[in-house]
Image (cartoon, helix red, strand yellow):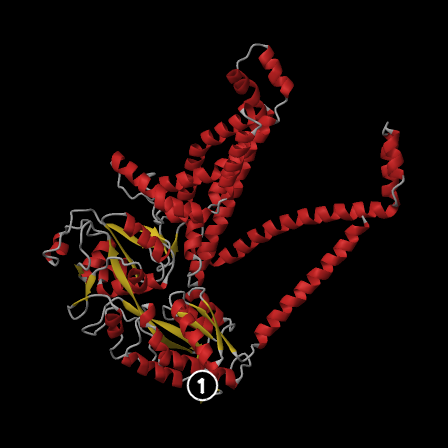
Amino acid sequence: MKSFFKNAKQAVAAAALLVAATAGVQTKAVAQDDKTLLGAGSTFIYPLFSKQFAEYNTKTGIQVNYQSIGSGGGILQLTNKTVDFGASDGPLNAEQTTKLGVPALHIPMASGAVVITYNLPGDNNLISLTPAIIADIFLGKITKWNDARITSINKGVNIPALPILVAHRSDGSGTTNIFTNYLSKVSPEWSTKVGSGGAVNWPTGLGGKGNEGVAGVVKQTPGSIGYVELIYALQNKMDYAKVQNKKGVFIVPSLASVTSASNVTLPDDAKIFLTDTDAKDGYPISGFTWALIYKEQNYNSRSADRAKKLLTLLWWNIHDGQQFTSALNYAPLSKEAVKVAEKILKSATYNGKPIL
Amino acid sequence: MSEVAESMELKTTQNPLGQIRLNITKRSFGQIRVESVFKKTLVLVAVLMVVIVLAIMLTLIIYSVPSLKSLGIKFLWGKTWDPITNVYGGFPFLLGTLLTSFLALIIAIPFSFAIAIYLGEYNPKGALSNFLKNTVELIAAVPSVIYGFWGLLVLVPMVRTLEMKLGVLPYGIGIFTASLILAIMIIPYGASLGREMIQMVPLNLKEAAYGLGATRWEVIRNVVIPYAKSGLLAGILLSLGRALGETMAVTMVIGNTNAIPTSIFGPGNTMASVIANEFTEADHTLYLSALIELGLFLFVVTVVINMIGKRIIKRFTNE
């Protein structure tokens, strides 16, 4: 029985040690050694960031610790000031902006796109779709593949008389945000009936969790149609559709056409959905992923040096870092986008003075 | 402390076995203190569990306040779930949760009971019995995401073929598929508990029945099952609890449609799976709060069903 006490004492000692150890780790994180920058957010950008940051580390010795916890989580962490930058596939919404309290900068990091993928028996990759058709399919108004509106713009393509099964994301996501934003822009009915956001009240169809969930439904069900990230479709060699853009051109989704989508006059804050672009050769369902930072970098008693390091990193990301995009199937920033991003980075301040 | 020692001595003197008394009086007060510390630890741990459950409940309530304020009681029977216009109704998900769980239970019970009776009565020992027992228990140990994958890749095409033959819309995924997956996942709970209870049926009861000329079937029907009833029912309740809360496997095969299911082959959604799907990217307060309220709702539903279940068990065993 004495051993009971002995063990209890040991247990207490061990627990105390453990607490001390964790506390040690925590203070270390709070103290933030200036060689490590912290980021969190978008899962979409994670493969690119991890490549870019690894390269940056070998080049400069500065380590970037990026947690891909989702855009919403990244914004929350930035709001709580536990990271140096957040990353998000959508711009801050009104509530997030209010919670942040002080101005934040949206710096475009790369572009992504959403493609319409489908499963039709036979060899019929790259069928053509117009915005109105896409909207009506996802509204549940076009229910057969051999609908006259679809067949009339796809002459010579064998389109079977299958019922259309819509597949959409069941989880909240940046992909859905871009896609529904696009539908809201091209279809007034969608805009009033459904609206746009990371998760919406779908008028029809099945929900799959993640790109793989949607792809699973589409791959298994003849006659289905869904939307996934361009990267996912490219990596998994899925069929996808050409989409007619604002200028009336049917555009094949590709890295080049997605980059072109951002090669338009952009607003000074780059806080814009690229969907339904004015660019003639741009794919219309494209969007930026942004890094989010505070405009005024002196907060939480951060050092000027740290702020400078963060800005230098992001500057590198939009210039030298862009060379890693294409290999990972991300669309690089267009010239216009880089120009705007430079301007935004230069507007960041420390004690009111520009950093770069 | 001395009272404890005295009372213990008192108890043991009443005990006719003098030997035990001898052993106990030899014990020191220190050892008795250990006993009391041990007992206090047990009570503390038990109370802690209650505190944790209450704390979870309280947290859910506090975080649901914005949603409770804005939507009120309508949340319970609202049919629309729209994060854009901030209209949240949990009814389709409640229906989905109950439908999948009870359907799964109906499918699972015959299997659970068959396994329980076979392993408890017909083949309680030996290599085959052990192998079967371990296999059934393994079913409970497989992570639910694996069931989800298996369901998506194997079960869904099979259900689709069936649906084509039945002439309903061949989604493949939907409430029926989710119930099938759930049924497989919950079989071991009913089977294990039932088997143990059946093995506990006293041999002399069974022998008496055999002595009266009962056949094996009659013994099982009239002696074993009535005796093991409470265990079998408790197994069902345990299975139901598991089915109500299961998230991952269901999410992957249920179709995640936020509308009231129109048939058991149609897609639907459950409370747990909506929370899992939408929680991470819920980007405004009311949305997040509505999801947490859905969690609270699920919590309450589970508690209520458990209470009803306990009532049923009590009634059946007390008759």
Residue A274 position, x and y percent, is 28, 71
Mark 1, chain letter?
A
Front residue of B150/B306: it is: B150
- Count the labels in the image: 1
Which residue is disc 1 drawn over? A349
Q: Is residue A266 visible?
A: yes
Q: Is residue B269 visible?
A: no
Residue A71 position, x and y percent, is 41, 66
Residue A110 position, x and y percent, is 34, 73
Q: Secondary structure at mark 1?
A: strand
Query: Disc 1 marks which amino acid?
Result: Thr
In this rendering, position of residue A2 left or right of residue B175: right
Residue at (39, 78) in percent of width and height: A317
Q: Residues within 10 Å of mark 1 (few under 14, many from 20)?
A: many
Residue A325 position (above or below residue A207): below
Q: Quadrant of the C terminus of chain A?
A: bottom left
Front residue of B21/B97: it is: B21
Quadrant of residue A134 in the image? bottom left
In this rendering, position of residue A292 left or right of residue A158: right
Residue A342 position, x and y percent, is 35, 83
Residue lying furthest bottom in this view?
A: A353
Quadrant of residue A170 in the image? bottom left
Residue at (29, 40) in percent of width and height: B160
In this rendering, position of residue B154 left or right of residue A121: right
Front residue of A54/A15: it is: A54
Residue A309 position (above or below residue A187): below
Residue B282 position (above or below residue A217): below
